[in-house]
Amino acid sequence: MKPQRYPSSIIKVGAILYKAFGWVDDDGKCHIDVDEWHVRSIQNRTVSKYFDTKKTVISLVHRLDNITWKNGKWLTNFPVHYRQKFYENEPLPNGFYTTQNMALRYALESTYQNIKWYQEEKAAGLWSADHEKEYNGELKLVKIIKSRITRLKNLKSGGKV
């Protein structure tokens, strides 16, 4: 899935982007996380000290209670892996989309790529019991992501939950 473009006319501080990630725990239970990332700042920065090139940098922060967000305010000091930056007029970083539906579709496509990799490993004869467990987890994950996409569509259309 191609990275989404985010036109500079729409970008503003406070805008929300989504990133979805599906994973399987050790017990075989599948989980889907749809994370909210907020545009925290938009700044003109010099990207080359030799050519005096300036670009607009958009900073995203992952909103997590008690880590980056507390009592209705952003915290100032939190780990760097809760921050992401990209340049204006460039595609969004991998996995970031403006809607939850697109983020889930990206997670679905990456899960299909994982399944394809497992099938190639099986065809090459590099298969183990761990591979089998992980492969079955990925197949379950596809069903869960599809059901989550359907639920979002039903909520949007005003249908059943």
Image (tube, rainbow, N blue to C red):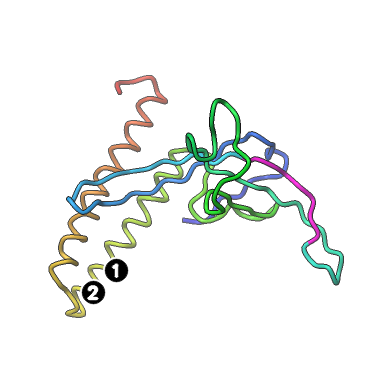
Q: Amino acid at mark 2?
A: Glu
- Please tell me the numbered disc located at residue 138: none
Q: Is residue 56 left or right of residue 140?
A: right
Where is mark 2, residue-wise?
121
Residue shown at 24% from the left, 55% from the top: 138
**Pointer 2 local density, CA inside 10 Å: few below 14, some 14–19, many at least 20:** some
Q: Quadrant of the C terminus?
A: top left
**Pointer 1 local density, CA inside 10 Å: few below 14, some 14–19, many at least 20:** few
Residue shown at 27% from the left, 49% from the top: 142
Observer-nearest of 64 and 122: 64
Residue 128 horizontal/vertical position (percent): 15, 72
Q: Amino acid at mark 1?
A: Trp
Q: Is residue 65 above or below residue 128?
A: above
Residue shown at 37% from the left, 54% from the top: 109
Tally of numbered tags? 2
Q: Is residue 64 magenta?
A: no
Q: What span is colored magenta in the figure?
A: 39-46
Could you tell me which secondary element the residue under label 2 belongs to?
helix
Residue 84 horizontal/vertical position (percent): 59, 52
Q: Is residue 42 left or right of residue 24?
A: right
Observer-nearest of 91 and 51: 51
Q: CA distance from mark 1 to mark 2?
A: 6 Å
Could you tell me which secondary element the residue under label 1 belongs to?
helix
| Quadrant of residue 75 within the rendered picture | top right
Q: Main secondary structure of the magenta part?
A: strand
Answer whether labels 1 and 2 touch (C-beta < 8 Å): yes
Residue 98 horizontal/vertical position (percent): 54, 40
Residue shown at 47% from the left, 34% from the top: 65
Q: Is residue 129 left or right of residue 23?
A: left
Q: Is residue 50 above or below residue 54?
A: below
Where is mark 1, residue-wise?
117
